[in-house]
Image (cartoon, rainbow, N blue to C red):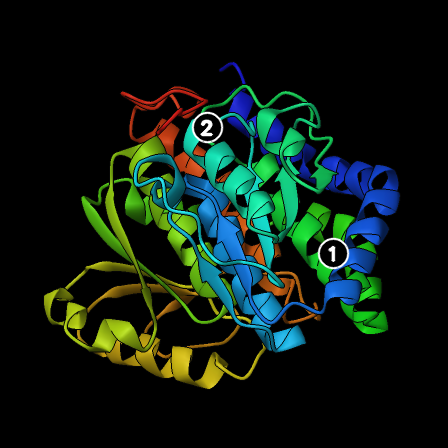
């Protein structure tokens, strides 16, 4: 069988991560110096789709590390409703694989005009979004041929975490970022085929997480939908108990993304409860009675451990799509660049 573009691009992630860190250091340092200079009281993010899940990951990382609140801003505020937000003294981070979507570009341009420090994270340094922003962190990921974003999603998050480490001058986080290419290589090699085998016959699924792993849960649920035709929903491992758990009955598939951080005991408690309800639970980061534990790369910085999980998951979901008879490169009714207004 011919290897899919998605499979090749997932395999490229460690090399792309290393190339980004090598080539983008001056841009990261310049943007970080600008953040230290303005000392923002709030940060806005602008993104859609997988890029918005990357922005959500950065929200948790920035709030936990820098203590600065981060809010996602709807691009339509500027593009449709023509409203300029009061962002003087704030920073605005735009995340877009292509940097072309008109609504993202309009919101970033409006943010620059309103006085925000604007930072574009994109694969294309000459894109419209990059041109209207004060700084650009170029991903250097090369062409991504599969409609499903993988290497650009991972590198977008790595870019944001590298920026955070430099902004906060956090030596431990800097060292963890530098070690990520090797960790991601380990993640690509892990076998999550038991999850793919179970989901091959599923119509619905839940994906759970806390903190940055909740952002990864949203990305995982999206990839199940777009590559494999599964109605998957992502929830916080706390929020799922406020109603959604009622539909979890015998053999309902649940993926719980745990990492070694302060939220792990609560996530494993939720996974245990759902397993007792009869769910087919798959979990990372801990052993849970009645659940299948999936392998993960050990001893990673808690702000980066969820990023390794998504790489293992990408390999799994590509296999899942093929098991279900889908072409993972060309999801139905979707295209690579979605130009919303």
Res. 101 mark:
2
**Disc 1 versus disc 2: distance between alpha carbons?**
24 Å
The label shown at residue 327 is: none
Task: Residue 295: tell me if it is visible.
Answer: no
Which residue lies under the disc numbered 1? 163
Using the image, determine if residue 307 lies above or below residue 223. Answer: below
Total number of numbered discs in the rendering: 2
Q: Position of residue 316 (x, y in %)?
A: 47, 42
Q: Nearer the viewer, residue 254 or 50?
A: 50
Q: In this view, does 70 lie to the left or right of 161?
A: left
Q: In this view, does 161 lie above or below 110?
A: below
Figure quadrant of residue 172: bottom right
Q: Residue, x 47% and y 41% (percent of image)?
A: 107
The residue at the point 36 percent across, 28 percent down is 340
Please tell me how crowded label 1 is: few (under 14), some (14-19), or many (20+) other residues with Cα within 10 Å. Answer: many
Q: Is mark 1 on a helix, strand or loop?
A: helix
Kindly tell me whether residue 18 is visible in this rendering. Answer: yes
In the rendered view, tell whether residue 112 sits above or below residue 101: below
């Amino acid at each position: 069988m011919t290897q899919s573009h998605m499979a090749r691009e997932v395999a490229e992630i460690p090399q792309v991560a290393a190339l980004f860190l090598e080539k983008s250091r001056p841009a990261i340092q310049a943007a970080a110096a600008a953040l230290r200079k303005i000392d923002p009281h709030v940060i806005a993010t602008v993104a859609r789709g997988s890029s918005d899940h990357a922005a959500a990951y950065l929200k948790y990382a920035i709030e936990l590390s820098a203590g600065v609140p981060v809010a996602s801003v709807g691009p339509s505020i500027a593009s449709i409703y023509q409203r300029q937000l009061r962002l003087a003294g704030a920073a605005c981070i735009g995340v877009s694989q292509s940097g072309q979507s008109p609504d993202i570009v309009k919101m970033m341009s409006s943010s620059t005009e309103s006085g925000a420090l604007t930072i574009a994270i994109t694969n294309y340094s000459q894109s419209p979004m990059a041109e209207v922003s004060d700084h650009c962190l170029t991903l250097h990921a090369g062409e991504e041929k599969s409609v499903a974003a993988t290497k650009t999603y991972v590198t977008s998050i790595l870019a944001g975490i590298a920026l955070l480490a430099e902004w906060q001058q956090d030596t431990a986080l800097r060292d963890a970022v530098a070690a990520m290419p090797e960790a991601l290589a380990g993640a690509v090699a892990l076998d999550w085929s038991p999850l793919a085998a179970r989901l091959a016959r599923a119509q619905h699924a839940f994906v759970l997480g806390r903190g940055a792993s909740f952002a990864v849960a949203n990305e995982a649920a999206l990839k199940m939908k777009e590559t494999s035709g599964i109605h998957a929903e992502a929830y916080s491992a706390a929020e799922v108990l406020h109603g959604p758990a009622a539909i979890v009955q015998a053999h309902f598939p649940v993926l719980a993304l745990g990492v070694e951080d302060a939220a792990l005991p609560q996530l494993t408690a939720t996974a245990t409860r759902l397993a007792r309800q009869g769910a087919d639970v798959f979990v990372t980061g801990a052993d849970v009675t009645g659940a299948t534990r999936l392998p993960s790369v050990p001893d990673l910085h808690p702000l980066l451990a969820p990023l390794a999980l998504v790489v293992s998951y990408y390999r799994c979901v590509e296999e899942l799509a093929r098991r279900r008879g889908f072409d993972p490169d060309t999801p139905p009714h979707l295209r690579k660049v979605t130009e919303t207004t």
